[in-house]
Each structure stands twice: as C-alpha cells, then as structure tokens.
Image: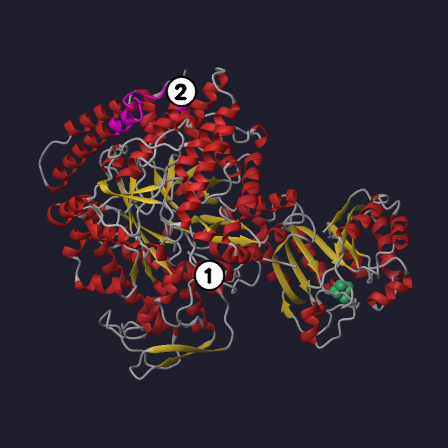
Amino acid sequence: MLNVHSIESLGTYDGPGIRLVIFLQGCNFKCLYCANPDTIAYEGGKSYAVEELVQMAQRQRPFFGKRGGVTVSGGEPLMQAKELIELFRRLKEEGINTCIDTNGSILTSASKTLLEHTDLVLLDIKHIDGSKHKKLTGVSNERTLAFADYLAGINQSTWIRYVLVPGYSDDPADLHALGRRLTGMNNIEKLEIQPYHKLGVHKYESLGWPYELSGVSANTPEQLNVAKKIFEGYVKEVVVN
Amino acid sequence: MFKSGNWQNAIDVRDFVLKNVRPYDGEGDFLCDATERTDHLWKICLDAISEERANNGVLAIDNETVSGVASHAAGYIDKDKEIIVGLQTDQLLKRAMKPYGGIAVVEKACQEHGLEVSDRVKDIFRNYAKTHNDGVFDVYTPEIRLFRSLGILTGLPDNYARGRIIGDYRRVALYGVNRLIENKKLDMLGLTGPMNDERIRLREEVAEQIKALGELNKLGEIYGLDLSRPAQNATEAVQWVYMAYLSAVKEQDGAAMSLGNVSSFLDIYIEQDIQMGVISESFAQELIDQFVMKLRMVRHLRMDAYNEIFAGDPTWVTEAIGGRLADGRHKVTKTSFRFLQTLYNLGPSPEPNMTVLWSPQLPEGFKKFCAQVSIDTSSIQYENDDLMQCTRNSDDYGIACCVSFQEIGKQIQFFGARTNLAKTLLLAINGGRCELSGKQVIPNIPELKSEVLDFDEVMGNFKLAMREVARVYNDSMNIIHYMHDKYYYEKVQMALVDTNPKVNLAYGAAGLSIVADSFSAIRHAKVKVVRDEAGISTDFVIDGEFPCYGNDDDRVDVFATEIPAYFNGLLKELPTYKNAEPTLSILTITSNVVYGHKTGATPDGRAKGVAFAPGGNPMHGRDKSGAVASLSSVSKIDYKDSLDGISNTFSIVPKTLGVDKEQRKENLVSIMDGYFSKDAHHLNVNVLNREMLEDAMEHPENYPQLTIRVSGYAVNFVRLTRAQQQDVIARSFFETI
Ligand code: SF4
C-alpha cells in the first residue's frame, strides 16, 4: 500500500507530456518555501493499493501521448521506495513511462532497485552550498549530491530542478558552483528553473505554521534570466518553468 | 478538369469530393494574412457590430417586408470591395421578419426595439395566414402545456423555426439550380399513387421545393449572379454556396442554421484555380475571409426572452472541418486551414461555429494547428470523427446545431430542445408533484416511505417519472414537427436535400450530472429529505461522503451512463411523426442557468436555483482529480445511447496546459487524442484565464471579440447576461500549481 496525499490527472509540469502525478504523503525535508507543506507530515494521506494506481494509469493512458506517463512526486516519494518498486515494475510491464520527482536524500538499495524501473528522475537540488542548503531545508545536501553522482554513474536520464528563491538561492556564485558540480554528468538532459511563488502560503496558515519567507517576493524576469544564462554555460538545456 | 464519377450522373456531392479532394498533410506555414480589402470590409462590420451592441443588440429591423428567399433588394457592406456578395436584407445587420413561426413573437421582438410590425403584415398573419405557433397551440394538450410552463420541457421550437436542417449548399455550386430543379421534377414524376396522406404530403413538399429553387435563381439575379448553372471557378463556387446558404437564412430563422461541410468541397475549386495560376494564395484566403465575414453577419429577429435559453444571439452557422473518408484518407485540405485562419485574419468569433472532426489519425500538422488556434482564440469545438463515422455509417456529414451528426443531403433532423432530468428526479421524490409549484404533474407516483432516501425506491419512482416525461415529450415533438411541416416548411433547404430523406428526432436531456451525483449520494451516503407542510421536498441533508461524477470513479459514473441509456430506451418505444428515428442529446446550450432557476434543491446537495452544469459536464468544482479524470468520466457516456450528441465544455488556464507554446500545443493534442480514443463524442476547448473574463465583465468595451465556448457553441462573452457571465466564470477551470 502507498500513502498518497493527492492525485492530479493532468500533470503538465512534472516530466514530459501529460502525466498522472501521484503525490505521496511524507517528507524528510522541511523546505522554507515548500508549496505543499501539507505533504510533509508522515501521517495523513490515503492508502492506495498498487494495482489501483496501475489501473488508474491504464485508464488514463490514451491521454499520455508519445511522451507522457506517470510521475510520483511528494512529499518525498523515496521514503516509500520499497512499495514503489512494485508500482513501477507493473507500470513498466504495461509499457508506461515512469518518472520520479525526488530531493535525492534517500539512496537505499530499494531506491536503487526502483531506479531500474524508472525512465526519468527529476532531481531537486535545493542548494549547492551545504550550510545554505541546511538553512533552506533543515538538512545537509551531501546525500543529494551523492545521489546525483550515483545517477550519473548508472547513466540515468535526469532533469535537475532548481527553485530560485530571491536572496536565498540566487547568488550567481552559487549558481556557477552548482553548474560546475554538474559538469560532465552526461545523463542530465535538462535543468528546470522553478520560479519562487507564494501559492502555498494559505496552507501554512491552515496548518498553523509560520511562513518564514513572507518577506521574499517573486522573481523578476531579470533574475530568472540571469540564472538561466548562468546555467546555460553548464547544462545543455535550461528552461524556466 | 475534375475527375469523373457518379457525381456526373446523379446528385452525389460526396462522390465528387471523394474523387477530387486533395488531402493536405503539411502545416499552416502557407497561410496568408487578410488583404487590405478584407481589412477594410471587416472594419465596417466591426463598427456596425458595436453600433448594434450600443443599440440594445439590434441595429435595424425591416418591419414592412416578410422575409423570403428573394424578398429584399441587394445589400452590401461596400460593394466595390466585396468579392463575395449577399446580405439577408438590403442593409448590413438589418433584421427581417419571419412571421411563419409565430406573429406574436415577431411583434414582441419589434416592440422591444420600439417598432410595430406594419399593419399589412399584422393583418395578414392575424387574420388570414396561420402560423406554426397557431397550429401547435391549437392542438397542444393540457398536459403538454403544464410540462412546458413548469419547465419540465423547455425551449421547444413552437414559436420560432425549428432549424437544425442542413441543406446541401454545395449542390448549387456543383450542379447549378436548373439541374436541381430537373432532378426534383423527376422525383415528382416518380411519386405516384396510391394517394395516401404521406404521398400527398410529399408531393406537395416537392412542389414547394421546386418553387423555392426558382426563388433561389431570383436571389442570384438580384445580385447579378447566374445560379442556374454550375459554378465555374473558385470565386463562383464560394459565391454559389453562400447564396444557397443565404437563401436558407432568409427563409428560416431556426435556432441553428448549420452550413454543413463545405470547406474541403470548396478546396477542390480553389486548388484547381491556384494550379492553373488564376488565383494566388492571398486571393484564396480572401475568398474564405469574405465568405466567413458574411456568415458572421447573419442575424435573426428574436425577442429578449429567447436570450435565456440561447444566450448571445447565436445563429449556429456550424461548419464541420476535417475528418476522414471511409477509405482511410483524411479530408483535411488547405481550405480547412484557411477557414481556421479567419480566426486570426478577422479575429476570434463565435460564428461560424467551427467544428473540427477529430481523429487521432489526422495529420500532425493540422492537429497542432487546431491546438494553436484553440489556445489563441477559444473558438473551436471538436467532435469524434472515428466514432461518428463508424456508428452512423457516413463520411459525408455536417454538424446540426451544436453537436449533432447529420448526413449531408441524405438525412435531416427534427429539433427537440430538451427535458429536465433533475426536475424529473424531484417528481419521483414528491409523488409526482412539482417541487416549486406543488402542482400534480404526474399521477401514480407512489409517495416515498421513509425520510432517508432509499436507493431502490427512488430509482423505481424515477423510472416511472421518466416514462411519463418521455411520453409527454414525444407527444409534443410529434405535434410540433407536424405543424412545422404544415405551416413553416423549409422549402429551400429541403430542395437541397434528397426527396424523402431519413429523419432523426433530436430529443435532449439536461441535468445529467445532478441526477448521477444524487443517486451516488443516495447510494453511498445517507440523504434525508426536508419537507414543507405540504410534504414537498425543500432541501436534503447529506450525511457521509459520496463519489461525484467527474473523477473517473465508476461507482458514480455508472449512473451517468445508465440513465441516458434508460431514458433513450423509453423514447425509442414511442411512435414518431414521419417515422423519425429518436435520438437523444446530453446538451443544454446556455439553458443550464434557466434550468437551475426552475429546479428546487436536489439530493446531491445542490441548492435550489443553482445553475446546472452544462451538457454532459460534471458539476462545477466537483471534478477534483484534474482534467483528465473529468474527461474520462464524460467519455463513459455511451454515444450509442445519445446519438444526438454529448456535449462537454473544457476550460483550462493556459499555464496549466504547459510551460511554453510548443508544449501547450503538444499537450492539447494529447488530451484530444486521449479523450476521443476513449470514444468520447464532443469537446469545447477554452484556453483562458479567469481574471481575463472578470476583467471583461467590468470592461466589456475592451473585449469586443472575446469568444468563449459554451455547451455546443461559442458566444461573444460580452453579449452574455451578467448571470450567464457569472455562471461561466464559476465553472471548473482546470488549474494546477
Ligand atoms: S523536499 Fe519538497 S516536499 Fe519536501 S519539504 Fe522540500 S519542497 Fe516540500
């Protein structure tokens, strides 16, 4: 059984084409800007049997087009890596494209097996600088970077996702450092810059959590452009989502 | 010249298209912008439209002349600049009287705009000529009147023309009027005795058709055109087809007056002229731009109340574009692109009602172009060509009104408006009494035994109620179409259709999502009725959760499929005028708002007066699993049980479709491929931001051409009433963060 926070049947931002996006409940990070803070707690959510989700994907399959499929996001989906293996194995059996959207902090043997059934990894790197990463997410980035190395080692198709938070993660020096770190990883097909937005703020209110980035405003087009230019020096395709 | 075939021996336009069509596999990069002449003419039209809007929606009315095929002198936008000519009256946007539907309606429409119908016309229609409306009300039963006044049957075509019939306007271009007259005369010779009712009626109809064709020749003469002979080049082909269509909208004011499927037919002439070097691409586009411009200027004289059911002054000049041939080739031509291109050259518009006959097998270039036009203009609707072709056995069809299949020149349709299934459910819960008036509508519906609704009991009563509604509905249809044939026969359109064609009787139902959700609530939760002193339901208290239609959940979607199937089965048992084949649509037009007003609280938790979801759509805000799940639910309604069509309106925020233009196009194509490969029937596509609509409500002057698709047609957003605008905005816009 998988603990699911919610399901979006028309996913157009989490991987290529049209995707069934399964948001799992529970996350081991606590990012200051998390747009879905209600997915962080381990409890809550709704149980779904693997077969139920497979059937859902099969029903939706005509909509996937040439490139679409299923994306598992979160929360942090690799917290349920063991259960996901069966889901992805079944989806691959059905010939459905699989994608996982992860913060890259959980590289267990279950994660490794899961990757064997994964077509694309969306790896969220929150920050290249260890201490700034800790400030943003509550944990260090060592494991995420090791995860990136592992993906490169097994030549796993990967898109890097990077949330550009003004004043927190948009220092050009950091962006260059991240770019350098990714250099030579030929498995990386694309880097997606995700603009910072406040659409999840009302969820903090209903959770009774403080929203610590209330002073931060959305990116200006120039800020996005600068970041894009920098990353383009390192990664073959850079898009702003 | 053209490749030969059976079309030369008989009236067989399909064969001509089959032999000569040039399917085009490429993209839209060949298309041209509007010419200076087109821009000049369109500017005049836009000015006239804004004057019309400023003048309470009507620019001018001819209150002297009864409209007919050749009733008016020639009218022009700017004669020297027009390469395609013809207006309904002698002045742009001047509306004409068509009193054969009913004189009272014409009088009212005139009075609402400060005019009186001329004494002569009043005298004729009050004292000498009988109208369709007179005929119907002479024979309506008390029962039908009651159903009508309580809003169980709504929008019946009993005081205006029924419309929906599509003449094969292509015939005039291909054969010329004289050949068509000869052919009808031959038919007449074959219509010999015994002279029973049917045979006499048919002979009279054909005689009327022959006279109408003579009138059509006269209409040509008024504009200096010799329609008696076939069109000889592209300009004439477009002009001849338009004259044929114009004759129809001069004679009739049906709610929906579709054009058919003329674009790929016209393409044959256009491509021939281009190949011979007689015309350029720019001229080809100009022909289509000017043709479409004329179609946009079609007007009918309506009274204000009409707007409740058919909002925004629609005319449903529906043109079916694309699709495939039975032999596997597709019918996408460069002129399919040229038609869509008018939405750029002249800007977005509800008319003509462009309907793309979609198949996942259509060329990628065309599919992407359609997606782009939808994203840019929200002016196209889509229908499932594979499904209709294989279910209805024809590859030469148009769309009657909003969404209904009609084989061109071979079949016609009797328009039947719709009945209110949600209200029918309330009859089942209230012992056959109307929940708003308390009137006994249906006898013999047992009172419910308990306050908590019991599924089997309610379903049993509902089936009884549906049977009664079907019976009364059928009676009303037979009366209406009998009388329409008698007093307001579509002479010129029927002259362009085979003699004695197959007829479909197009019934309709509204409120499906409410009924489906209600039964889901009754089955999966606990629903208690709140009743007033008279024992009539005023509200429902729901305890527990239940799945809602629109989330791809079979536990409720099953009701949305079984109920139309059951109701359709009931309709099929009943005898029909002219042996018409009963078909059912799940369609509301904009009447979903009015239906809501006329319906009390329902067991799904919908409050009294709240608007229904349009057509086959899930109720607003209840489809919580995203667009694909919502579309999947609607796709389950079986077309075989609703052969008149299942409308679905899909509104999405541009950003939700994807991050950039390319991806949005690709994703929209995937959505339609997916939806239609699941055997869904129809999709309206709106790609819009809610904020923009809100702004348009406040500043209509900034959005004169803002077009939005509603159930089965498109409207000028700023022409909707405020309530209708609010309804559109309240509906589900698929939006993800
Ligand atoms: S990793 Fe993702 S889900 Fe977890 S807290 Fe951070 S942003 Fe939220």
With respect to residue B647, does B425 lie above or below? below
The answer to which image quadrant residue B88 occupies is: top left
Q: Which mark is residue B233?
A: 2
Helix, strand or loop at disc 2?
Answer: loop
Residue B33's image quarter?
Answer: top right
Part of the protein shown in magenta: B216-235
Residue A214 appears in the picture as rendered: yes
Amino acid type of the residue that numbered disc 1 sits on in the rendered structure: Asp
Query: Residue B727, which numbered label?
Result: 1
Task: Decide whether residue B233 is among the magenta residues.
Answer: yes
Ligand 1 in which quarter:
bottom right
Specify the subunit that label 2 lies on. Answer: B
Q: Is residue B328 left or right of residue A22?
A: left
Where does residue B586 sit, x and y in percent of width and height? Answer: 38, 55
* Labels 1 and 2 share a subunit: yes
Quadrant occupied by the N terminus of chain A: bottom right
Q: Is residue B512 magenta?
A: no
Q: Which residue: 34% across, 41% down? A: B406
Residue A1 in view (yes/no):
no
Percent position (x, y) of residue A109?
Answer: 82, 60
- Residue B731 against residue B16 in the figure, above or below: below
- Foreground of the two, A103 or A54: A103
Residue B119, how many percent across, how many down? 17, 47
